[in-house]
Image: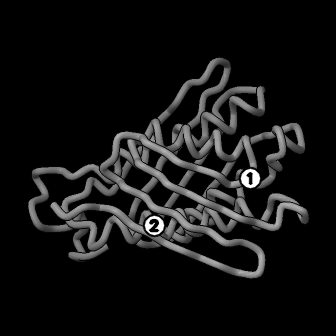
Amino acid sequence: MADRIAYIERKTNETDIKLELNLDGTGQTKIDTGIGFFDHMLNSFARHGFFDLKLSVKGDLYVDSHHTIEDTGIVLGQAIKKALGDKKGIKRYGQRILPMDETLMLCALDLSGRPYFSYNMSLTVDQVGYFDTEMVKEFFYAVSYGAGMNLHIKQLDGSNNHHLIEAAFKAFAKALDEATQVDPRMRDEVLSTKGSL
């Protein structure tokens, strides 16, 4: 199988992003977004999904965190799509119910090529560190549309905002790891009656 690695650069008046993603890595990271909690979440995503992720973001944090987080989601989604190529042999679907202390989070996804995002989390503070909690929804929305992914994230239990957000990132990582795995039964085809994803 060819290396499933993507490198994407995206520069706007608001952000300058360089991202490299290896879907078949070991969880190695080098991440700097300028937002400590966001770096922590992306490190958790890479480590628990066994993705290698190099990411440098220079954003207009003097405004707020919105552009930095949303644009990173766009680029990560694009990198997932690019690294998957024609998607031949992948399992396509992934899901995880992930516990973290008092928190229980569900993530299910389909690498169908059709973007859709469904989200249900109850966050009760405006920020965790310098990370605006309303940006959790915007980040995953951007990932789903950048990747062409059907993505569902649902809070089943929990109250600590740090735990809830971290559980969402980890559940997403585990579901994506499952969906991107190659199924040897598929040989040189995609898991679709249409013949393409």
Residue 196, quarter of picture: bottom left
* Closest to the observer, 49 or 57: 57
User: Which circle's residue, 1 or 2, is located before the other in the chain?
Assistant: 1
Viewer can see residue 148: no
CA distance separating discs 1 and 2: 20 Å
Tell us which disc is closer to us: 1 or 2: 1
Per the image, label 1 sits on a secondary structure element best described as loop
Tell me residue 7's x, y (percent). Answer: 43, 69
Q: Amino acid at mark 2?
A: Ala
| Residue density around tag 2, few if under 14, some if 14–19, many if 20 or more, within 10 Å | many
Image position of 52 with respect to 122: above or below? below
Q: Residue at x 69, y 29 (%)?
A: 163
Q: Residue at x 64, y 39 (%)?
A: 40
Tell me residue 171's x, y (percent). Answer: 52, 39
24 displayed left or right of 50: left
Q: How many marks?
A: 2
Image position of 45 with respect to 188: above or below? above
Q: What residue is disc 2 on?
A: 79
* Closest to the observer, 36 or 104: 36
Q: Amino acid at mark 1?
A: Gly
Q: What residue is disc 1 on?
A: 34
Image position of 15 with respect to 159: above or below? below
Residue 82, quarter of picture: bottom left
Image position of 164 with respect to 3: above or below? above
Q: Residue at x 74, y 32 (%)?
A: 162
| Residue density around tag 1, few if under 14, some if 14–19, many if 20 or more, within 10 Å | some
Residue 165, quarter of picture: top right
Q: Residue at x 33, y 65 (%)?
A: 84
Tell me residue 176's x, y (percent). Answer: 42, 49
Quarter of the figure with the C terminus? bottom left
Quarter of the figure with the N terminus? bottom left
